[in-house]
Amino acid sequence: MNKLGIYVQVPFCQTKCTYCNFHTGVVSSERFAPYVDAVCREIREYRELYRATGVELPEGFEKAVVDTVYIGGGTPSLLEPELLNRMMRAIPEAFATELSEVTLEADPETVTVEKAGAWVRAGINRVSFGVQSFVDRELVAAGRMHRRADIYRSAGILGDVGIRNISFDLIAGLPFQTKESWMESLGALVKLGPEHVSVYLLEVDEGSRLGLEILQSGTRYSAGAVPSDDAMAGFYEKACAFLGDLGYHHYEISNWAKPGFESKHNLKYWRREAYLGFGAGAHSFSGTQRWANAHDASAYVGAITEGRLPAEQLERVTRESALEEELFLGLRQLDGIDLGRIEREYGVGLRTRFEPLESAGLVERDGETVRLAPARLSVSNEVFVELMR
Ligand code: SF4
């Protein structure tokens, strides 16, 4: 173990987007500072908190150097910069650091010149923007607070203060999205030249108001205007072709980057490298154990204030589940997996498991490397289901 990622969760938003299935809430800003103080305490006292909870850090963990930080949410850009800075200052008090990538998730309407300047001074060098669409009608229907004009204004501010690594998120499948409006968003996005792009397909489940409405055929959140699954897959495929033609490297199912701008922090998740998550609902992986903090922000603050880590789902990663993770997380990356290495490391034979998938055109094999077939990227979940059979 030498490099370590730190994730900090800020579970607060200004409003709840209709499609959002994250554990985030709209709360009074008075609750921000106590939450941040709890996160700082969790960071500073992580060793004692882990020890008391049964988290065992692997040998050599104390020598790990933090090289990536990701402050996500929620909408962490809502916080006053002083609060973000407080959390950033807590990290080197508890860990050795050589920070190369420090990402802040931001929503366009929250960006001001003052805030952005303070982010840079706090060490933030990458911003991941929740853009979702450049079409105002889609943004309104999705319950987003920003409009197209905010994206241009905020991207300009970030450029002016010297942030040279910006990621834009788009969602394929928003209500009222059409082939034309999707291309309009993609075209507007690339004109701004972000270093990184993420494209997510709308998730339909009971965890969001829109998802629930689609499942129950309601009308309040424009469920009837959500594009079909085939249309969504088509949008995704258009993005693959469009971004690829412009030189963006498609390195993970949902992620593209200009060469050298792949997210160092997120790569740790897919490569099964260690990261520690702080804050309500944050997940951690030490290399041998996985756990998550309680989602409820009040319960989290209450527990930390009492000197307890509200860890849930603490489990040792068995050899069997480590192997499954190698396959599923590995296949999310377009470089694919090294079958020979995995077979040697886990002492298993996997060829017979992949042969039917290869015959069905779901994966491609090139020597020892297995990767998802490019034509099946938009339905990767179906491939993973087949792999589990
Ligand atoms: S801003 Fe992001 S986290 Fe917050 S409600 Fe919207 S989608 Fe969810």
Image (cartoon, rainbow, N blue to C red):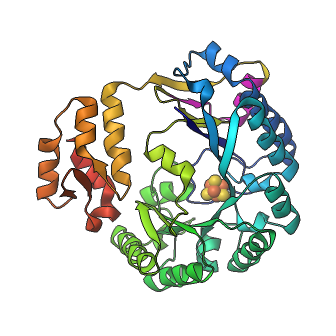
Is residue 148 in view? yes
Residue 49, quarter of the rendered image: top right
Quadrant of the drawing holding the C terminus:
top left
Magenta range is 290-304
Describe residue 137's horizontal placement relative to residue 160 as left or right: left
Q: Residue at x 85, y 48 (%)?
A: 29
Residue at image position (42%, 61%) is 251
Left or right placement of residue 31 versus residue 266 in this view:
right
What residue lies at 48% left-to-right and 44% top-to-bottom? 269
Q: Is residue 298 above or below residue 222?
A: above
Dividing the picture into quarters, in which one does residue 306 lie?
top right
Q: Is residue 218 magenta?
A: no
Task: State whether residue 26 is above or below residue 65.
Answer: below
Question: x%, y% of residue 253?
Answer: 40, 60
Residue 298 magenta: yes
Residue 205 or residue 56, whichever sits in front: 56
